Amino acid sequence: MKNGTVTRRDFIKLGTGAAATGLAGKVTILEPLRLAASPRPVPPSDTIRFAILGTGVEGCSLLTATLPIPGVECVAAADLYDGRHIAAREALGGKDIETTREYRRLIDRKDIDAIICATPDHWHRRVVEEACEAGKDVYCEKPMSHTVEDGLAIVASVRKNNRICEVGSQRVSNILYAKAKEIWDSGKLGMVDSIQAGWDRNTDFGAFQHPVPPDASPQTIDWDTWLDGAPRRPFDLGRFFSWRRFKDYGAGLAGDLFVHLLSGIHFVTGTNQPAQRAYSSGDIFYYKDGREFPDLLWTLYDYPKFKVVLRCNSNNSEEGEFFRFYGKKGTMLIDGKSVTFKPEAPSHQMDSYTILGWPRKLREQYEAEWKKEHPLPKVGEFKIGHDETEVFTTPRGYSDHTQHLANFFQAMRTRQPVVEDEVFGNHTAIGCHMSNQSYFNRTAVVWDDAAQQIKAA
Ligand SMILES: NC(=O)c1ccc[n+]([C@@H]2O[C@H](COP(=O)([O-])OP(=O)(O)OC[C@H]3O[C@@H](n4cnc5c(N)ncnc54)[C@H](O)[C@@H]3O)[C@@H](O)[C@H]2O)c1
């Protein structure tokens, strides 16, 4: 291995996902960006101090992902289920931080610079607005908004208070996506007319049926506060732990997974607007557990220069997570661990089909001319298969969560733009809402930019 470039044999030994593509060609392990929340060691007085609101699955992942970032420190966590106060401390390696059910206490603390919001979606707007009003910068989980109105309000609040806001689709900070963008920008794909992406899973938890911890009860959970902004209901552990199934709190497969796919596509293609039109189809095929969102969802989106097809299937995982960008001169694939560029070999086939209806003399004349213009390559110059294929992969242990959080903290210090701000996050969230609105109303929908609304097509 030399300068991050490995032979195919080295690569297979590394055992990464890209090896499974079985493609010949050059394989490169990409170098992660430096984790620079601060360019040099930071004295304790200059450390960024942050609090996290919501320390469930994602909140705990984020806390652990902050640990390698220099110059930042979690000082407090709020959650409405007491077990998650313990989980938060454990995610920080046992650090003794303030934990509370009262998120507002943390927003009011003057010694806290930033808030990470990892609550369910129906709480995002309130947390971001209150944090911005209190002068905090905010890292808000994806999908940024629960409704179109929430998204517009978040954008307005961040702007009004002149805050930094990073939205949490961490893949846009992934070195794979930076490489994919470089390939896109180089024009190597030629004209791209379509992009297909999907995220298929075949597990109960992948389909939003999450186990309930044995100590969960009305005594250990503040159910009333959790419901705030949503209709009142009796205590319901299924809703508390598996909220993505219900419209009052989440946005189903679109809000959970399409948002990552749309963020990746917008980032790579340099798109910063919602899709113009969307049409969805899907159904609840297997998980008939009272959920409102489908367990299979397809959406076809129109963008000005290409079409996008997204799919999430909860009942078959054959293709896992993938993106395919189809260009006239090549195809680019992204999977969980690699980016592959496959040039599309120009066709060197004579059109022997159309000339079937020509008189023999004209056919022979055409054939002779074609062969003169397309001489056979000399022996030794033949290229078989995609030997120009390039594969790029991440090093073992690479975390785009850490990279994305580092981007946020660095922007806090420099007051320079983040990679995924509230406007970008709003546009991808609108794409999710378009998908759902089309699915539920059984009609195509359009984004009316002047009215800032989704309307029936
Ligand atoms: N970026 C990613 O890859 C990724 C992955 C998973 C989840 N998410 C997002 O993260 C968010 C949380 O998802 P999750 O899977 O961790 O959910 P979760 O249910 O596991 O955790 C959410 C926690 O928020 C707490 N909470 C709710 N309202 C609160 C409030 N007002 N104050 C304090 N705590 C409050 C709840 O008590 C709960 O423990 C969602 O927006 C989700 O879409 C992002």
Image: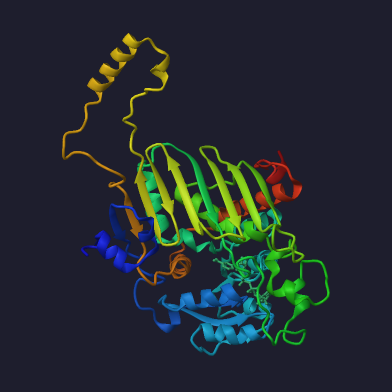
- In depth, the one of 303 and 450 nearer the eye is 303
Count of marks, rendered view? 0
Image quadrant in which the N terminus is located? bottom left
- In depth, the one of 352 and 206 nearer the eye is 352
Q: Residue furthest left?
A: 379
- In depth, the one of 83 and 252 nearer the eye is 252
Q: Splitting the image into 4 quarters, where does residue 28 fall? A: bottom left
Query: Where is residue 449 drawn, in percent x and y?
Result: 65, 42
Q: Can residue 422 be seen here?
A: no
Query: Where is residue 180 drawn, in percent x and y?
Result: 40, 52
Task: Reply above or below: 105 against 173.
Answer: below
Q: Splitting the image into 4 quarters, where does residue 118 fall? A: bottom right
Task: Reply above or below: 68 against 10.
Answer: below
Direction from residue 162 to residue 187 in the image, left or right: left
Q: Residue furthest front?
A: 360
Q: Where on the image, by quarter, is ligand 1?
A: bottom right
Q: Identify the residue at image location x=55%, y=80%.
A: 111
Direction from residue 143 to residue 293 in the image, left or right: right
Query: Where is residue 294 drawn, in percent x and y?
Result: 69, 57
Image quadrant in which the C terminus is located? top right
Which of the colour schemes (rainbow, by chain, secondary structure, one colour) is used?
A: rainbow
Q: Splitting the image into 4 quarters, where does residue 30 fall? A: bottom left
Q: Can residue 442 be seen here?
A: yes
Q: Identify the residue at image location x=62%, y=56%.
A: 155
- In depth, the one of 243 and 46 nearer the eye is 243
Query: Where is residue 275 drawn, in percent x and y?
Result: 59, 44
